[in-house]
Image (cartoon, coloured by chain):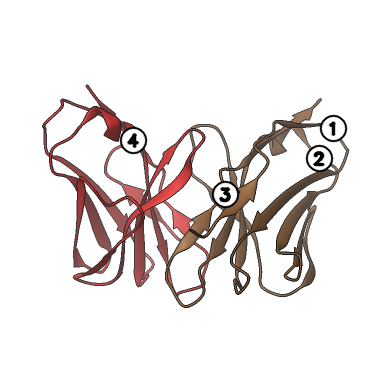
């Protein structure tokens, strides 16, 4: 059974704080993704990684960075949190390029 | 901009009826399509994937793909209240690792 876990289910941070969201998958998947999900806007891709230390920008990378030092772990970093980054953050992984995406439980982030 | 369009709903159907969910996509060369179910406050989980024209059945679920018309649909037979959720359509962009998601259709199955 594929398992994708995220470090926190709920987070409350202050504007300007540096925020780390961590995602771990246990199926040796090559590809990992970070999305944010907002009402009416659906899932939007922030960044993805197709290998260790490899990353590519998604559709909305501004204000975010990522790190993938180990295959199983993909971190999303909000360099200086802002209120418009309040959202549900979802991590996903896939084994190949056209495979099913497996999602983590999500982190609901509130930036005050 | 590649797009995936879904009617946001809510789509209300009585228990035991067939629910029909539709999705259209703009990239004519797309090859891989996915339906996810998302309960309120939870993350998406895969229901079905489909890659070829025609129907694909899995239990009460049938995915239908028509590449010429650029639409993919999901039929849920014998709908149950537990099927009440938001259904997301996703399309893989050919030659990339990227997936484009629709905004989802909210389904309500009335007991």
Which residue in the structure is indicated by mark 2? Answer: B79
Q: Are marks 1 and 4 on the same chain?
A: no
Which residue in the structure is indicated by mark 3? Answer: B102
Distance of label 1 from label 4 (alpha carbons): 33 Å
Secondary structure category for the residue under label 1: loop
Secondary structure category for the residue under label 2: loop
Secondary structure category for the residue under label 3: loop
Q: Chain coloured red: which letter?
A: A
> Which residue is drawn at the image coordinates 73% and 50% (left, top)?
B22
Mark 4 belongs to which subunit? A
Distance of label 1 from label 3 (alpha carbons): 25 Å
| Residue B47 pos. (x, y %) | 64, 55
Q: Are marks 1 and 3 on the same chain?
A: yes
Mark 3 / mark 2, whichever is N-terminal: 2
Q: Colour of chain B?
A: brown
Residues at marks 2 and 4 touching, judged by CB atoms closer than 8 Å? no
> Which residue is drawn at the image coordinates 80% and 52% (left, top)?
B60
| Residue A52 pos. (x, y %) | 22, 72
Which residue in the structure is indicated by mark 1? Answer: B15
């Amino acid at each position: 059974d594929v398992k994708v876990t995220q470090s926190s289910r709920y987070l409350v941070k202050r504007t300007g704080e540096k925020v780390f969201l961590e995602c771990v998958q246990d199926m040796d998947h090559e590809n990992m993704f970070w999305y944010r999900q907002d009402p009416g806007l659906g899932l939007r891709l922030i960044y993805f990684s197709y290998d260790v230390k490899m990353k590519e920008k998604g559709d909305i990378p501004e204000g975010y960075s990522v790190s993938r030092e180990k295959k199983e772990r993909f971190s999303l970093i909000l360099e200086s949190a802002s209120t418009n980054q309040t959202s549900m953050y979802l991590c996903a992984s896939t084994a190949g390029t056209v495979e099913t995406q497996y999602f983590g439980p999500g982190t609901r982030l509130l930036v005050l | 901009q590649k797009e995936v369009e879904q009617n946001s709903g809510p789509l209300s159907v009585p228990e035991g009826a067939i629910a029909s969910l539709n999705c259209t996509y703009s990239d004519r060369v797309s090859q891989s399509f996915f339906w996810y179910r998302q309960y309120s406050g939870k993350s998406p989980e895969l229901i079905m994937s489909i890659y070829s024209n025609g129907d694909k059945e899995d239990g009460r679920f049938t995915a239908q793909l028509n590449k010429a018309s650029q639409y993919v649909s999901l039929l849920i037979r014998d709908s149950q209240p537990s099927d009440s959720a938001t259904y997301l359509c996703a399309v893989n962009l050919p030659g990339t690792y990227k997936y484009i998601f629709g905004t989802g259709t909210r389904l309500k199955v009335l007991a």
